[in-house]
Image (cartoon, helix red, strand yellow):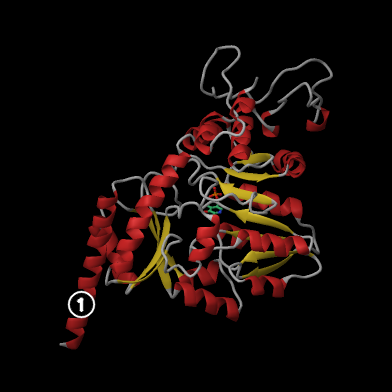
Amino acid sequence: MTRKERTEGMGFATQAIHAGIEADPITGAVGPSIVTSCMFTAEFGDIGFSAAGTNESKVPFAYAREGHPNSAQLERKLAYLDEAEDAVVFSSGIAAISGLLLQELSPGDHVLISDVSYAGTAEFARGFLRSKSIEVSLVDMSDLEDITANLRPNTKMIYAETPCNPVLKLVDIAAVAELAHAKGAKLVIDGTFATPAVQKPILLGADYAVYSLTKYYSGHGDALGGAIVGRREDIDRIRRDVGVHLGANLSPFNSWLIMRGIETLKLRMAAYSQSAQKIAEFLEQHPFVSSVRFPGLKSHPQYEVAQKQMSLPSGMISFKPLDNDALGHAISANMKVFTFAASLGLSRSLILHCDTKDLFETTFVLDQKHSDRYRAWAGDGFFRLSIGLEDVEDLIADLRAALDAAASACQSDKLQASQ
Ligand SMILES: *Cc1c(COP(=O)(O)O)cnc(C)c1O
């Protein structure tokens, strides 16, 4: 009996640790060994000159770009965690996302993409896809009417992130799946901010879930990786075309690091969520904070959607202070624990500023209606927090120190101006 059968039907934490991993039949090693060989040997006739020449029923691996033991273990684990049929991994989240879009869309097709999303996705869709004659509409995925109004006869895909980076708007996955399927389009959900420990897009009706494994899955900020999860037939096709021919596959070492991170994913998501809830509540009552967006707060405009499809709020918060520059300047002098940096989902807590003007010039190039919506939600800019695993009291003290310092700097500026 294989390990996969032994853990079938068991809980998330059990799968996170055991699924996809079997003791090494030669050495007896319990945990996965890292297999670095780029080629694998077999009998005459079972391996040919190209990937198509591999006899898959006999030879699991022929050449590492087509797959290797560590990526195969990780893929099985990921499929289990999302309760999906299969998964394929890539060298980064954006390699998975761009690969999926290129696989599914042809010139003349139309795709709906979130007006606000991970910067790389927004830039790839607006620039690269449009340059290849793929029609791209940027819509507000939190608004079912905006989606419906933008569907066309050639719409092949709806692509959405939830919770969405960086503003933490949510998308009702089941409702958007219904809209997509009624038009014969596929729904892709980028669930990086949640992971299946919190939200399961495939069970909610999405055709594909995509992830940056770099973030919560890996959990340590030391390995880039990405994944596409979905039906076996679709994933097979993607592995053969995008995986083999674009060649952005995940290295054995990164596969191993990410599997190691996944063993604690459930525990970590619970810890991130619990601390983030306390921090969001602290921010909400601080006088220098004008608004907080966090799916665990009742004040989140889509709190109901969060309750419906997320089992935990996850660890990402965005908030607006009364004065962004004042807080920005207060960070390095007053914060001892938070690091000012991009990325998210690791043990360390991070803070990042998202300036609206900069984003509008480089990333979210939107029409008037969607720019107005973005400003209504995000103002001129906000700070994004990725809550880590430090003691929550220290994180709150850090934020309080910077917010109080920013507030008193603004006070003394005002005093000076009035003198
Ligand atoms: C980081 C991120 C990506 C891209 O992943 P990389 O691993 O950095 O390529 C995609 N989507 C979301 C929501 C992200 O946060």
The quadrant in which residue 176 appears is: bottom right
List the residue tagged with mark 1.
411
The residue carrying mark 1 has its beta carbon less than 8 Å from ligand 1: no
In this view, the residue in front, 36 or 234, is 234
* Residue 354, x across and y down, in percent: 44, 65
Task: Please tell me how many numbered marks the rendered image carries.
Answer: 1
Q: Quadrant of the N terminus?
A: top right
Residue lying at the far left in this picture: please name it.
419
Q: Position of residue 23 (x, y in %)?
A: 56, 18
Looking at the image, residue 151 lies above or below residue 32: below
Q: Is residue 386 above or below residue 145?
A: above
| 151 to 296, vertically: above or below | below
Instruction: Name the side, left or right, on which 337 lies relative to 358.
Output: left
Nearest the viewer among 14 and 228 is 14
Residue at 63% x, 34% y is 76
Q: Amino acid at mark 1?
A: Gln
Residue 362 in sight from this viewpoint:
yes
Taking the image as shown, residue 97 lies to the left or right of residue 212, namely: right
Residue 292 located left or right of residue 213: left
Q: Quadrant of residue 398?
A: bottom left
**Quadrant of image for the C terminus:** bottom left
Task: Classify residue 232 as left or right of residue 282.
Answer: right
The location of residue 387, given as percent across then percent down, is 38, 52
Label 1 neighbourhood size at 10 Å, few (<14), some (14-19), many (20+)? few
Nearest the camera: 396 or 354? 396
Q: Is label 1 in a helix, a strand or a loop?
A: helix
Residue pictured at 55% horizontal, 51% vertical: 199
Residue 164 appears in the rendering: no
- Give the percent coordinates (x, y) of residue 128: 68, 60
